[in-house]
Image (cartoon, coloured by chain):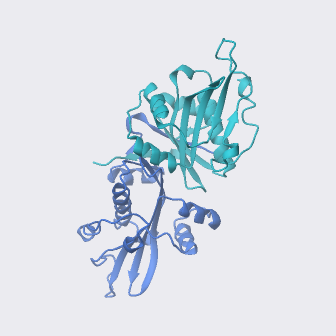
Chain colours: A cyan, B blue
Amino acid sequence: MSFWKTWFSNPSSLGSNKTSAVEELTAGYSGNSSTVKEQIIFSTERDLDLYELEELCDAVGWSRRPLRKVKKAIEHSFLVASMWQVKGNKKRLIGFARAISDHAFNATIWDLVVHPEFQGKGLGKALMKYILKKLRSEEISNVTLFADPQVVDFYKTMGFMPDPEGIKGMFWYPQ
Amino acid sequence: MSFWKTWFSNPSSLGSNKTSAVEELTAGYSGNSSTVKEQIIFSTERDLDLYELEELCDAVGWSRRPLRKVKKAIEHSFLVASMWQVKGNKKRLIGFARAISDHAFNATIWDLVVHPEFQGKGLGKALMKYILKKLRSEEISNVTLFADPQVVDFYKTMGFMPDPEGIKGMFWYPQ
């Protein structure tokens, strides 16, 4: 994991400051044995290609959602984080997550996804660290999420606690 | 509960439309035996007296929070719902809740509070119904919350499910 430890050294403000929206991983990405230089880049830029995002979500088997609503959700999220593989001048979206917030106390992370080809390399963790760093820089003190059973342990390793002091996550769907 | 059944008959849009921000309960409030006419009113108006809100939160024993942050949280909530007791020309804040949202898929309800003097009369349920109606009118299909152990059963009666399909609510706090 020592490859990633320098990712989070540059403090930057959230989305609105476009000049600092992209953070590069300057260390080489070890997952590829070819000689082409490969980088992993993180961004809070919201201007995503929705078809590329849909492709990423397809790759992990998520149900498709109307792009009109996805666009609206991205516009109204407090934080939009994306992770990119960069090889030469080619850029590929390999991870995504977003958070909604009251800009003061609480943020809830939704739609965290890492492309299956890039899973198991610590990149989900790296994306989550990036998100937590961004939320902390905005003084959000309570970060929540709803985890599917198979990823509860993953989030535990990131310091998330299920049901702290018996607090229950609850869902309501229209009848 | 038949007193309350007419509360939700007038569809109205969210906060931005000020003329419809207040919904009156025209049926008399049965909790008081005096002859002074008493009404319970619901509103999505954001222009709350923060000291009055703090007083309400004090009454249920919540830790105080900086008013500057409370103000910011209210400004950036998707929905702010308040419940008022009206007697003659006197208005008293007796309930509050707010929701954050991506304006498309998810909303999370925070800070639901009902003044102790008005608990056990179905008013928490009425406030929650009001909130759910507002969120549904905005096509939000997934409403979530984090419930303290002692109120899990209350939310169950409202149709909220804890850990549906094993999904876990998880919290992260800064170290």
Of B97 and B115, the residue lying toward us: B97
Residue displayed at 41% across by 69% down: B17
Q: State which quadrant residue A95 falls in.
A: top right
At which x and y percent is residue A36?
68, 16
Residue at the left extreme of this rendering:
B2
Residue displayed at 58% across by 33% down: A156
Of A173 and A10, the residue lying toward us: A10
Q: Quadrant of the N terminus of chain A?
A: top right
A47 left or right of A14 in image: left
Number of callouts:
0
At which x and y percent is residue B65?
62, 63
B31 left or right of A131 in image: left
Of B131 and B63, the residue lying toward us: B131
At which x and y percent is residue B117?
43, 72
Is residue B52 shown above or below B69?
below
Is residue B122 shown above or below A124?
below
Residue displayed at 46% across by 29% down: A55
At which x and y percent is residue B93?
46, 74
Residue displayed at 54% across by 45% down: A99
Is residue B75 shown above or below A119?
below
B30 left or right of A23 in image: left
* Residue B157 visible in the picture: yes
Is residue A114 shown above or below A131?
above
A51 left or right of B70 in image: left
* Residue B113 visible in the picture: no
Q: State which quadrant residue A128 falls in.
A: top right
